[in-house]
C-alpha cells in the first residue's frame, strides 16, 4: 500500500471511529420511520438467540405484526453482530450504515480510477458526498447505503476480473450480499455488471481484454445467488415451518402492481417524469453539468471547440450512467408505487459521471480539486457533514432534507 493510500485509510478509520463514538454518545435515533424500525429490529436480534435471526418478528407497535418478510435479513445481521460485540445495540444499525457509506465512497473512487485520471477519481470521494441525496440519507438505518456498496463491489470486481480473474470473487460477494440485503431487487446486480461490460466494449480503443474472467464472475455470481436463495428458504422453513420467498415475492410484486391494471398511459408518463425529475435533482448540480458537457462535446463549435472531447474512460462512464438511468427509471415507471429510494443507485451513477464532466468543463472546480487532492480530504468532508447532521438532530433543529421535485 502506498503512503497516500495508507494515510487515506487511516483518515477514514479515525473519522469512522469518531462517528461511531458520537452516535453512541448522543444516543442517536433517526426520525425516518423505516430507519427506526430496522434499528429496533437489529437491536432486538442482538438480544435474541442467533438461530432465530433468520426469522425475526415485527417489534410491537408497528404497522404489522408477526414474521417480518418484507426483506431478507442481510441488513440486520451485521448490526446485530456489532451489538453482540458490545456496541450499543440501539445505534448499531446507524453505525453500520456509516461503515457502508465509507466503503461505498472508497469503492467508487477505485472503480472510477479504472476509467479516468487519478485526480478526477479521487475528487469524486468528496464531490459525491455533496449530492442532495447524500444529505437526505446521511444517517439512516435503511437499505440504500448497503445496496450501493454491494453494487459497487460487484462492478469493481467485474472490471478488475477483465484482467485478473481472481477478482471475480468480489463480483460474487457483491451479488450475494445484494440478494441478502434487498431480495428480489438483486436482479439489478447482474444486469448492471453486464451493462458495465457492454459500455466498456463499446467505448474501448485499441487492444481489449477478453473479458472472460468478468463474464465467469457474473455467471458464478448468479449461480451463487440461486444457491443462497435456496439455502435461505431451507433455513427459514426449518425455523418457522413457513415459506419465505413465495410470500415475499408475492407481496413485493403485488404491491408494485396493485394499481397497474387500471393505470393509463398518462399515469405511466407521469411516473416517468416523476423519476426523471429525481434524476436531475438528487445528483444536482453534477446532473446538469453532465448534460452541459455532453451538449458541448457534441456541438464542438467556436469556443466550445477548445473543450477536449471525452476519452474512452469518460465515454464508458457516461454511457454506463445513461444505461443505469434507462434500466431503473424504465422499469420503476411501470409501477405506480413511487419512492425516491427505489432508484438510489441512479443518483450516484449520474453524480459520478457528472462530477467527472464538471471537472473537465469548469476550470475553477478543476483547480479546487487539484488543490484538495490530499488523501485525507474525503474523510474530512465526511466527518464535517456527518457531525453537522448529528448536531442538528441532537439540538432538535431541522436536519438537512432537501426538497424533491
Image: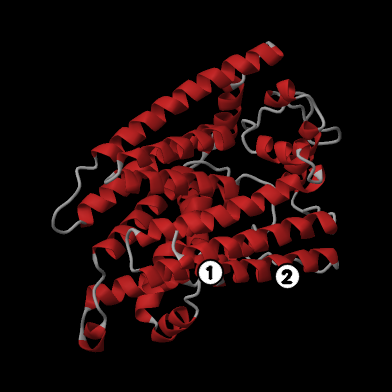
SS type, badge 2? helix
Q: Secondary structure at mark 1?
A: helix
Residue 136, above or below 94: below
Q: Residue 137 in the image: x percent, y percent?
A: 64, 57
Using the image as rendered, state which of residue 1 and residue 55 is in the foreground: 1
- Residue pointed to by mark 1: 126
Q: Is residue 252 above or below residue 189?
A: above
**Count of all numbered marks drawn on residues in the image:** 2
Residue 69, can we see it? Answer: yes
Q: In the rendering, at what x and y percent does residue 158 appear?
A: 35, 44
Query: Could you say where residue 126 lies in the image, as x and y percent from the top left?
Result: 53, 69
In the displayed structure, 159 sits above or below 114; it is above
> What is the quadrant of the N terminus in the image?
bottom left
Residue drawn 56% across the image and 70% down it: 376
Q: Label 2 belongs to which residue? A: 388
Q: Residues within 10 Å of mark 2 (few under 14, many from 20)?
A: some
Q: Is residue 128 visible?
A: no
* Residue shown at the point (35%, 39%) measured from the top left: 166
Which quadrant of the figure has residue 65? Answer: top right
Amino acid at each position: 500500500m502506498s503512503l497516500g493510500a495508507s494515510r487515506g485509510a487511516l483518515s477514514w478509520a479515525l473519522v469512522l471511529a469518531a462517528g461511531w463514538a458520537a452516535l453512541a454518545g448522543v444516543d442517536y435515533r433517526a426520525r425516518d420511520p423505516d430507519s427506526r424500525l430496522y434499528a429496533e429490529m437489529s437491536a432486538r436480534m442482538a438480544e435474541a438467540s442467533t438461530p432465530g435471526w433468520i426469522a425475526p418478528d415485527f417489534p410491537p407497535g408497528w404497522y404489522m405484526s408477526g414474521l417480518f418478510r418484507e426483506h431478507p435479513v442481510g441488513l440486520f445481521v451485521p448490526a446485530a453482530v456489532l451489538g453482540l460485540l458490545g456496541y450499543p445495540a440501539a445505534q448499531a444499525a446507524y453505525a453500520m450504515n456509516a461503515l457502508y457509506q465509507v466503503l461505498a465512497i472508497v469503492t467508487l473512487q477505485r472503480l472510477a480510477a479504472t476509467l479516468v485520471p487519478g485526480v478526477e477519481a479521487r475528487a469524486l470521494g468528496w464531490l459525491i458526498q455533496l449530492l442532495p441525496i447524500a444529505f437526505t440519507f446521511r444517517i439512516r438505518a435503511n437499505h440504500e447505503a448497503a445496496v450501493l456498496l454491494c453494487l459497487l463491489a460487484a462492478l469493481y470486481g467485474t472490471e478488475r476480473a477483465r484482467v485478473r480473474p481472481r477478482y471475480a470473487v468480489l463480483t460474487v460477494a457483491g451479488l450475494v450480499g445484494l440478494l441478502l440485503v434487498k431480495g428480489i431487487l438483486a436482479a439489478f446486480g447482474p444486469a448492471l455488471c453486464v451493462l458495465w461490460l457492454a459500455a466498456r466494449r463499446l467505448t474501448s480503443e485499441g487492444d481489449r481484454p477478453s473479458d472472460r474472467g468478468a463474464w465467469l464472475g457474473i455467471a458464478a455470481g448468479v449461480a451463487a445467488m440461486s444457491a443462497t436463495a435456496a439455502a435461505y428458504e431451507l433455513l427459514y422453513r426449518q425455523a418457522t415451518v413457513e415459506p419465505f420467498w413465495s410470500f415475499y415475492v408475492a407481496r413485493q410484486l403485488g404491491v408494485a402492481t396493485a394499481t397497474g391494471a387500471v393505470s393509463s398511459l398518462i399515469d405511466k408518463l407521469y411516473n416517468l417524469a416523476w423519476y426523471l425529475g429525481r434524476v436531475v435533482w438528487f445528483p444536482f448540480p453534477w446532473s446538469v453539468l453532465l448534460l452541459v458537457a455532453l451538449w458541448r462535446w457534441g456541438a464542438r463549435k467556436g469556443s466550445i471547440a477548445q473543450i477536449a472531447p471525452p476519452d474512452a474512460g469518460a465515454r464508458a462512464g457516461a454511457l454506463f450512467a445513461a444505461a443505469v438511468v434507462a434500466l431503473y427509471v424504465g422499469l420503476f415507471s411501470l409501477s405506480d408505487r413511487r419512492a425516491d429510494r427505489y432508484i438510489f443507485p441512479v443518483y450516484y451513477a449520474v453524480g459520478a459521471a457528472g462530477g467527472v464532466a464538471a471537472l473537465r468543463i469548469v476550470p475553477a472546480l478543476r483547480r479546487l480539486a487539484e488543490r484538495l487532492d490530499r488523501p485525507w480530504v474525503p474523510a474530512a468532508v465526511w466527518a464535517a457533514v456527518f457531525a453537522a447532521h448529528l448536531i442538528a438532530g441532537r439540538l432538535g433543529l431541522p436536519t438537512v432534507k432537501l426538497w424533491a421535485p
